[in-house]
Amino acid sequence: MTGAQDSTTPSSFDGTTGANAEDTRGAPAVDMRGVTRYRTMAKMVASMPMDPDDFAEVLAQHAEFIANGGGGGRWETMITTSDENAAIVFGVYVGPKAAAGAQAGLAHRRLTGLDLRGVQLAFADLCGSYGPGQDLTGANLAGSLLVDSDFVGANFAGADLSGADLSRAELRRCSFRGANLRGADLEKADLTGADLRGADVTDAKWPKTIMEGVLR
């Protein structure tokens, strides 16, 4: 996450394995098990799943955005307050302006029931999105913003998450087998029971990541 403590481990992991994680933003230390996301972010998830036709249109517009030079930028994340009970997180994309298309804005969207296999969402905004148990095998999420998202039990096997920001994401029991996590930011993410076998984690960032029971 932009501005977060930088702790890179090219070939090893240095995550949190106990229940408590220090909050480096000035708020009191809290028990982070099960509440890695800011509490308000979980409450902001859309009540209804996204319509498949609307999602298809977002994908088409995003493909145009990438094809016309919109990719290759970076996300800066903003937090409204250090109070974990009230904080709202959002992202600002710093990158080239595309000549056509529109960048996918899927923040806080409920993605359950959609076909996400091989989905092309590089450099997309998925901040606070919700897709537990979803199949994202072979998905391209490189450079995307997935902070405070919930993908518990999802399958990211073979997915490209290089450079993605997954800070505080709920990723318990996810499969990342053979995934590309090069340079991904997993600050305070909960990877309890996740499968990282065969994943490329070169230069990934792991400050206070919860790693209990991770297979690697």
Image (cartoon, rainbow, N blue to C red):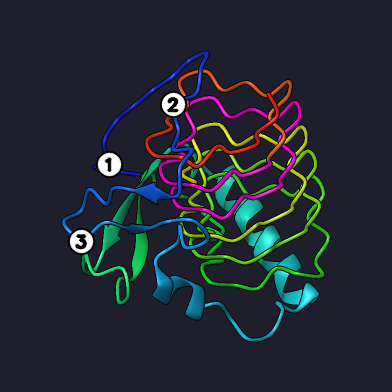
Magenta residue span: 167-193
Q: Please, what secondary structure does the residue beneath circle 2 have?
A: loop
Badge 2 is on which residue? 14
Q: Position of residue 96 (x, y in %)?
A: 39, 43
**Badge 3: how crowded within 10 Å, few (<14), some, or many (20+)?**
few
Residue in front for this viewpoint, 15 or 145? 15
The tag earlier along the polypeptide, 2 or 3, is: 2
Q: Which kind of residue does numbered mark 3 sit on?
A: Ala
Looking at the image, is 29 positioned above or below residue 214? below
Q: Residues at badges 2 and 1 in contact (C-beta under 8 Å)?
A: no
Q: Please, what secondary structure does the residue beneath circle 1 have?
A: loop
Q: Which kind of residue does numbered mark 2 sit on?
A: Asp
Mark linked to residue 191 = none
Q: Residue at x 65, y 73 (%)?
A: 110
Badge 1 is on which residue? 4
Per the model, the C-alpha gap separating discs 1 and 3 is: 14 Å
Q: Residues at badges 1 and 3 in contact (C-beta under 8 Å)?
A: no
